[in-house]
Amino acid sequence: MNYKNFVFDFGNVLASFDGEELLTHFCEDKKDRALLKKIIFENWQALDEGTIRYQDYINQALLQTPEHLHENVRAFFKDWHRYLTPLTQTWDFIRELKAFGHSIYLLSNAPVYFADHASEVYEILNEFDGILFSAPVLLAKPQPEIYRLLFDKWDLDPQECFFLDDKPENIEAAKKAGMNGIIFTGDIEAVKAAAFS
């Protein structure tokens, strides 16, 4: 199959998303980081789904956090989006696909705050023909509706699309929606073998 369109997730496909590693930029003490990780990521899915306002989520986190860590929490929510480590092999692959005339789309679960600021930090997003983040549309993978929205928004034939995501349940949902794909492990050669064989 010669796929016309390639669809990428963001976290752990375009850039690493590791809560523990992220927190090292905002808190030095290991014990405090463990506490913050539990509080900050307790209901992150709600941020991805857009079912809670970003500021409300911060306020809830602060209520659970000891006062001496309040500034750490505020700093995290202001700047965490700047500290995802680019996966440069994926970026190179995207540029290669573009050079060969493929269209590139993003389908990623992410809070509204990330959706608003990601393109300021990660220039690879300028290469994309379409970007769909979950929270602004109040949907999240693996809900079937978000895949249909992707196809409808850019008039894509699912059978002409190939999807890269690090979570098996998201790939399974994509296949049910008619789009082939592969669970991304960082191995670009495996992606090429799956997409171009």
Image (cartoon, rainbow, N blue to C red):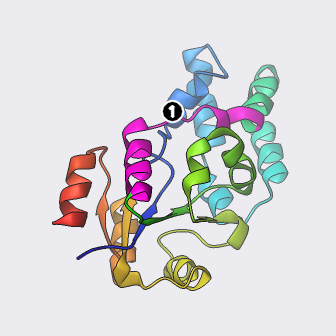
Q: Is residue 68 visible?
A: yes
| Residue range (magenta) | 78-99
Q: Amino acid at mark 1?
A: Thr
Q: Nearer the viewer, residue 20 or 165?
A: 165
Give the overall secondary structure of the magenta segment: helix
Tell whether position 175 is magenta: no
Q: Which residue is mark 1?
A: 85
Q: Is residue 4 above or below residue 185?
A: below
Task: Count all numbered tags in the image, as a single digit.
Answer: 1
Residue name at image x 77 percent, y 29 percent: 75
Q: In this rendering, would 73 be left or right of 15? A: right
Residue name at image x 49 percent, y 41 percent: 15
Q: Nearer the viewer, residue 65 or 92?
A: 92
- Which quadrant of the rendered structure holds the C terminus? bottom left
Measured from the top left, where is residue 16 in percent x and y? 47, 39
Residue name at image x 68 percent, y 64 percent: 135
Measured from the top left, where is residue 39 in percent x and y? 65, 39
Secondary structure under tag 1 reads loop
